[in-house]
Image (spheres, rainbow, N blue to C red):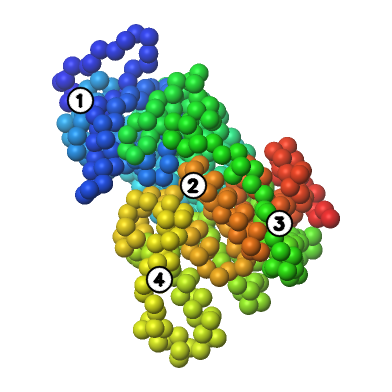
Amino acid sequence: MIDAHAPAQPRSSGTPPALIALEGIGKTFGRVKALADVRFEFRSGECVGIAGHNGAGKSTLMAVLTGVFRPDAGTMTIEGRPILDYDPNAARAAGVRCVFQELSLCANLSVAENMSILHPELRGRDWRRRATRLMLEQLDAIFPGHGLKGHELIADLSLTQRQMVEIARAFTVVNDPVKLVILDEPTSSLDAHTAAQLLAFVGQACERGIATILISHMLGEIVRAAHRVLVMRDGRVAAVLPREAIAHDAIVAAMGQELDAGVLQARRRETDPSDARAAPAYRWTLGAGAGASIEAPRGEVIGFAGLAGQGQSEALLAIYEAATKGRERVAFVAGDRPRDGAFPLWSIAQNLDIRWLLDARRKSNGDAARFALLPRAIDRRAARALASAWAQRIGIRGAPLGAGILSLSGGNQQKVLFARALASDAQLVLMDDPTRGVDIGTKRELYRLVREEAARGRTFIWYTTENDEFAHCDRTYVFRAGRVTRLLHAHECNEQSLLAASFADSEEVPA
């Protein structure tokens, strides 16, 4: 609750008013100090970019701003007035909205019904029609050409479409005003074109006086949209960069991570020709007619590009099914982590080593009776060592391995899924936007691991919505409406070629 009788704090005439001011905010979970002495002002009409590695305290800070967590130390003021009792209802009344990285939509409800959950004032005889109209108006404003009707079931939408609905819902005004919108990795499942639409709208919202917080590991987006950048490290404010100082390298330096051109430009190293590369290339024909014809030589990294929702994920699933039927050793890193990747009731270690159990079953030659006795025969020490080694190698931090998977941040959960695939004996690894929500330092480590594993003969097929990542691919297939419009080799895979092929209407698959 905001004390309406408290006097407003004075502010200088040269800066916008402080919508929310934080003074010495601290938050501790057991022995973990998630936030420590955080001091910052969020101003009306300003986009603040927040950067930091996974576990830096970004999500905890957002939970404090939305009233989910009550800080253990420090004070908050809204528009100069101190907060006496702050919870999610008070945050909503104050105009604070949040687009969560792990989407909060109810999958069993329609788009319009999900609108009414955030806006309970939508009631009465024609509430559904009104909710649908408001949603479509906001979708049209943010994502022109989105193609949604408003009556779809959330469970039937793609991850990209769900992200769009969540964003539109947050910016919609019914009764309570919208003063601050927190965007937590909002473009993690959007393609470059749709992400550009969102960033353009953020600029328009700022011009109307709405404050936005942009949390993103895609630092180029922060450089483009932010008026100031708050860099966090180990629960503290590491730096605050004004507009004139915002640059990719400056953000990375403030995060405490050194630029490593060698990793960014890493290519596979030469190996003995007698290794797995000597095996025939993988080949699949997906769909009828001029569909997707995919060739993946052993030991190469193959990219799937194009606008989101053009059939890339479906192609990965079709390849996985074909490879499984062909008894290939294949692993899959899911892009929709909550729905397809993580076992939410299991520990971090169990989520990581489950594939190890499947490998054990395969090595038992499919003997069901023998596998039924496997739990007694499992070397628990070896399983713990496997989980511990990969947790350290990939940098899974934030909770002990015995803790539940949901105790980790979204980025660290994604690391667990990646580690699960690489710790397996799979020779073919399919990756559906695997670095979604992962910090830049970890991304570089993952890029290095992919190149190292490819050098050992593993084959990777990698769909990503980040065009920069195709620099790590040996060849890239660009998809449009479920078809391959162009094959780009490493030397010709640039932003211009990717965009041209992404919007191409040709149905002819290039040689």
Labels 1 and 2: the sequence-earlier one: 1
User: Would you say the residues marked 3 and 1 are in contact, meaning their CB atoms lie under 8 Å apart?
Assistant: no
Which quarter shows the C terminus?
bottom right
- State yes or no: discs 1 and 4 in contact (Cβ < 8 Å): no
- The residue to which callout 3 is attached is 270
Q: Tell me the residue at 41%/32% (across/down).
A: 231
Q: Can you tell which mark lies on residue 82?
A: 1
Tell me which numbered mark, 1 or 4, is placed earlier along the sequence: 1
Disc 3/disc 1 C-alpha distance (Å): 63 Å
Tell me where residue 132 appears, x and y as whole percent: 47, 44
Q: Which residue is mark 2?
A: 442
Using the rendered image of the protein, determine whether residue 185 is visible from the camera's viewpoint: yes
Q: Amino acid at mark 3?
A: Glu
Q: Amino acid at mark 2?
A: Thr
First along the sequence among labels 4 and 3: 3
Residue lying at the far top in this picture: please name it: 13
> Can you tell which quarter of the image residue 34 is in?
top left
Classify mark 1: helix, strand or loop: strand
Give the CA distance from mark 1 to mark 4: 51 Å
Indicate the secondary structure of the residue bearing disc 2.
helix
> Where is the N terminus found, in terms of image quarters?
top left
